[in-house]
Amino acid sequence: MNITLANFQIRAISDLMDAMTKPNRDIILKSCTGSGKTIILTHFMDEFSKGNKNTVFVWLTPGKGDLEVQSKEKMDRYIYGSQTKLLSDVMTSGFEENDACFINWEKLTKKGNNALKDSERTNFIEHIQNAHNSGLTFVIVVDESHQNNTIKADDIIELFHSDKIIRCSATPNNYKNALLIEIPEADVIAEGLIKKLLVINENFEQHISVDDQITYLIDKAIAKQRELQAAFLQRKSEVNPLIIVQLPNKNDALLERVEDYFETKGITYENGQLAVWLADKKENLEDISEPTATPIAVIIKQAVATGWDCPRAHILVKLRDNMSETFEIQTIGRIRRMPEAKHYECDLLDCCYLYTLDEKFTESVKLSLGKDALDACKIFLKPEHREFTIISEYKTDVPFPRDAKLALKVISKHFANKYHTTNDVVKNKALLEANGFSFSQDVVDYTKSGSVVTLGKEDFSELNDVAIHEALNTTKHGREYHHCIGEIGLKVNLDYNSINTILRKLFLEGLKCEGKLTAIGVRNMYSFVINNKRKLIEDVRDAMATENAQINFPIKQITEKPIAFPLEMLFTYDGSAKSQSEMTKNVYKGYLSSAEKRSMPEKLFERHCQASSNVAWFYKNGDKGSEYFSIVYEDNFGKQKSFYPDYIVGTTDGTVWIVETKGGFSKTGDSEDIDKFTGKKFDVLKRYCDKYNLQGGIVRQDKNSSELCICIENYTDDISSDSWKLLVDIL
């Protein structure tokens, strides 16, 4: 099965490879449910085995749900020709080089478990000893490690005498001197693998008193399931969204009441629409994870939360109970995967939904997910704004593959502009050296030497730079080269093979290409990439964003159409915020000052609009989707991108403004804007406003004066420039 790895997955594999060269025994891989942890680990295991002979991987899973079989099957599917085993295979043939053995903890540790009798347990230990005697080394992977933090489990790990233990969990325990590799949740969301937001108790009244939590919550869930299913059908998708009803662990009386209530709604075991997964009761579970499976609801207890993979699960009904936080987050993870591993650019489908009257559970979830878990309600457009329209631009629907040939051309052009390189590779080498590139055959590390009297910044800058040279070792430094290439590729959304080819064509001897920069030898290529990693990352990233690297591309089709403000919107807010006042100038009724997710510049701008006598109304634009206002621009690889300006504002004199907010300027005047495309967005915004006779600008905060400033003519990153005006004087 050919899988395209996401950028964050490539980075995690590189980080794991890197971690194997460090002295730390424990490596913690912290990644949220839905990030493809098994994909990351199996690709890492395959990659590591290629360069490290005599390795055996032992993957330990918790006992419930045949997780070890699932994980083995995934590796067989993802990695062609992988050498996988289960415990029964190990007991038959022992451990062999390049094995990946998937073993269930409890078959080794649990009392009364007949998987291994005492004599077999001894036999298992002998297999480990035989492996050691044959010169094999073990690398241990502990899956869902938070569940097996026990003496018995630790004793099993110690049997393997492993120098490396990789512990994986969405909620890992702390280990002393462990190396943490954390996959940011934002990266997983950005790749479309998990839902953007968990919506808690949508449209609940402010003060609820209900006679029966079951009827109240299940009614909400069924209504939401029907709404989701209709939206999927509209997109010609056959995904059947699933409701998970979670019962308290020790409360069996609720089961019957839940089943009875579902029956009154025509959802039963008999017609296949209801499923149950409890220790002593299982119904309609076959193929339940398939996108088009018949059940629309499944009843579970907390035990099933671990390792169960069902991407069509969209709604969780949590009946009142108190549980440990670890399990809560694992359970939430069950509804966070995207059913088709992509966002639909539709808020309804790109969110997941929790319905519960358990305040303790809600608090715990909010604490863990922060701004990824919010209260929500539906709000409606005020009648006086229903006639407003604005022309929105849309890119052509042709998917744009990240073109490695084009990337090579753009990066080469960037070097020509920045370093004045030509077709003369000898001269180019001298130019690059003069600009700080290292062409040393050795791998060079830098440190400082000298003495300081005080610990001021100035004193340290006076110290001498000391270069430590290490002769290149292709085995040892090959891994580092691999890591560097992967890291550089991430900056331009290119996979390892593509960026490796680009850099080799530009710098390596014997490969012809237009815009060739140097012709260094194969061994030197390793040290060149390792020694210049930082500079290469900076140049590759800048090649994409810098205006003067723009290469002329044929103009692509842009679709234009007038759009109105959506008549209703899912309004998400922080119910625990102190201020819950209504922003009456917003075009929606019931828009609160506690609106989330909002950046600090957005919050400050909304407060300004509400307070300004010049502003009649303001609208917060969405950041994705055809129902929101967008302007099209091109990055330097010729890829069309949609720019969704943050706000549309109407003034008291009838002028319409389009405003984008960005990070501010520090007290010393330094830019805190992390968006490298701001200048480009300003240009397309100005072009758009001139075309349609509107006003527009970029708003940023000057932290020195605490004032909001706006740039409306010539964009600059210098806050002291006359281009920046006080917002209160303009809008």
Image: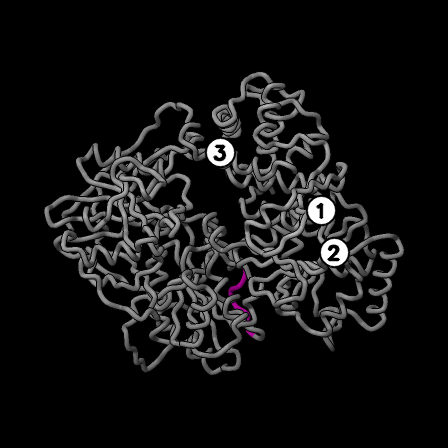
Q: What's the residue at 20%, 48% (across, down)?
A: 649
Q: What's the residue at 38%, 69% (across, down)?
A: 355
Inspect the magenta stretch and tell me whether residue 535 lies in it.
no
Helix, strand or loop under label 1 = helix
Inspect the magenta stretch and tell me whether residue 285 lies in it.
yes
Q: Distance between the residues labelled 1 and 3?
A: 27 Å
Q: Quadrant of residue 80?
A: top right
* Residue of label 2: 139
Q: Earlier in the sequence, mark 1 or mark 3?
A: 1
* Residue of label 1: 48
Residue 76 appears in the rendering:
no
Q: Where residue 407 sits: x, y (%)?
A: 50, 29
Q: Earlier in the sequence, mark 2 or mark 1?
A: 1
Relative to 511, does residue 203 appear above or below in the rendering? below
* Residue of label 3: 402
Q: Distance between the residues labelled 2 and 1?
A: 10 Å
Towards the viewer: 468 or 131 = 468
CB atoms of marks 2 and 3 within 8 Å = no
Towards the viewer: 695 or 457 = 457
- Name the residue type under label 1: Phe
CB atoms of marks 2 and 1 within 8 Å = yes
Q: Distance between the residues labelled 2 and 3?
A: 36 Å
- Name the residue type under label 2: Val
Looking at the rendering, the stretch of residues picked out in magenta corresponds to 281-286
